[in-house]
């Protein structure tokens, strides 16, 4: 009987020991699971926080860039609007042309000189301009074996333009310089059978039709009148013996004091010299991008 009791107590002790060991193992496993879960949750939270921070910084940068772009667009549109209000102000134009403004007309057929010039249009649409040109030489169309002498001419003046909001501008011009040329009627062995060039100075008044927008090209038509106060003296000579005056040119009345003139000019209004607000802003952006 005693053996049975002792054996029963041993079995109970062993069962109790196994139960305690199992509980301890379960507690350790639970603690490990909890720790791992906590660490996992902490790592996940950290990753989410970092991700949210990165996304927040990226979104902030995108917003700043978009805001800067929109601001640049708005300022560009405003600058373009200002330029569209006035195509004329602060424009430097280099010109090539023929006829009365580059810089003279004359008697031989169309009689056009060929030349070049420059014009600066101020903010008040008043322009300063000057030109220098060449009078062509060649064969006389009316007399065989006779040459026509060539030469040069010049002109300087003021222009005033209207309709600044429209690319097509009407203008008025007054200038002084070489206004007319002709050739001496005498051509013989003493001057190598060449008719000498005669030019006369005077004033010119023109109406201008000009195309000029924000682009670089320039086109101008001009028609007007010249007035040469010294035309008579330039085109007549006095015989020393008789004192009689005779015309040096084909026209027996000499070079007329008044005459109708016209011309055509093309030009290059380069923005690099006097840039508008849009061009200045474009240069600033290019500089920022290069830096």
Image (spheres, helix red, strand yellow):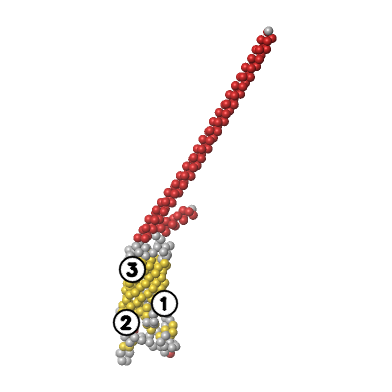
Mark 1 highlights which residue?
134
**Closer to viewer: mark 1 or mark 3:** 3
Report crowding for label 1: few under 14, some 14 to 19, many 20 or more residues within 10 A (C-alpha): some
- Residue 217: image quadrant is bottom left
| Residue 194 in the image: above or below residue 133 | below
Residue 128 percent across, percent down from the top left: 35, 68
Callout 1 secondary element: strand
| Residue furthest top in the image | 1
Residue located beneath label 3 in the image: 170
Instruction: Determine which quarter of the picture holds residue 131.
Output: bottom left
> Is disc 2 placed on a helix, strand or loop?
loop
Extreme-right residue of the structure: 3
Quarter of the figure with the N terminus: top right
Q: Residue at x 61, y 24 (%)?
A: 25
Q: CA distance from mark 2 to mark 3?
A: 28 Å
| Distance between the alpha carbons at the discs numbered 1 and 3 | 27 Å
Contact between marks 2 and 3 (CB within 8 A): the answer is no
Q: Residues within 10 Å of mark 2 (few under 14, many from 20)?
A: some
Residue 256 is tagged as: 2
Query: Badge 3: how crowded within 10 Å, few (<14), some, or many (20+)?
Result: some
Residue 289 place in picture, x, y as percent: 48, 54
Q: Is residue 53 above or below residue 142?
A: above
Q: Position of residue 154 (x, y in %)?
A: 38, 75
Cβ atoms under marks 2 and 1 closer than 8 Å:
no
Q: Earlier in the sequence, mark 2 or mark 3?
A: 3
Q: Nearer the observer, disc 2 or disc 3?
A: 3
At x 36% / y 86%, what residue is drawn?
Answer: 250
265 to 255, vertically: above or below: above
Select label 2 or label 1 by which is in front: 2
Labels 2 and 1: the sequence-earlier one: 1
Q: x and y percent of residue 285 in the render?
A: 45, 55
């Amino acid at each position: 009987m005693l053996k049975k009791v002792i054996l029963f107590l041993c079995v109970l002790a062993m069962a109790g020991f196994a139960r305690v060991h199992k509980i301890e193992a379960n507690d350790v496993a639970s603690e490990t699971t909890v720790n791992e879960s906590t660490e996992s949750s902490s790592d996940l939270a950290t990753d989410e926080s970092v991700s949210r921070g990165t996304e927040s910084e990226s979104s902030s940068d995108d917003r700043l860039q978009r805001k800067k772009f929109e601001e640049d667009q708005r300022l560009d549109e405003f600058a373009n609007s200002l330029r569209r209000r006035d195509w004329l102000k602060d424009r430097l134009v280099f010109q090539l042309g023929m006829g009365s403004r580059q810089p003279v007309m004359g008697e031989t057929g169309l009689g056009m000189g060929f030349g070049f010039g420059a014009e600066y249009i101020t903010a008040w649409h008043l322009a300063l301009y000057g030109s220098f040109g060449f009078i062509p030489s060649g064969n006389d169309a009316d007399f065989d074996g006779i040459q026509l002498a060539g030469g040069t001419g010049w002109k300087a003046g003021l222009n005033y333009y209207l309709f600044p909001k429209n690319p097509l501008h009407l203008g008025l011009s007054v200038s002084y310089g070489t206004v007319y040329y002709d050739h001496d009627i005498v051509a013989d062995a003493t001057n190598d059978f060449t008719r000498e060039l005669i030019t006369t100075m005077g004033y010119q008044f023109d109406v201008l039709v000009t195309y000029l927008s924000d682009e670089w090209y320039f086109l101008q038509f001009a028609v007007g009148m010249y007035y040469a106060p010294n035309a008579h003296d330039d085109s007549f000579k006095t015989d020393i013996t008789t004192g009689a005056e005779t015309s040096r040119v084909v026209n027996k009345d000499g070079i007329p004091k008044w005459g109708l003139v016209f011309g055509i000019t093309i030009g290059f209004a380069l923005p690099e010299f006097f840039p508008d607000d849009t061009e200045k802003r474009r240069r600033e952006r290019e500089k920022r991008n290069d830096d």
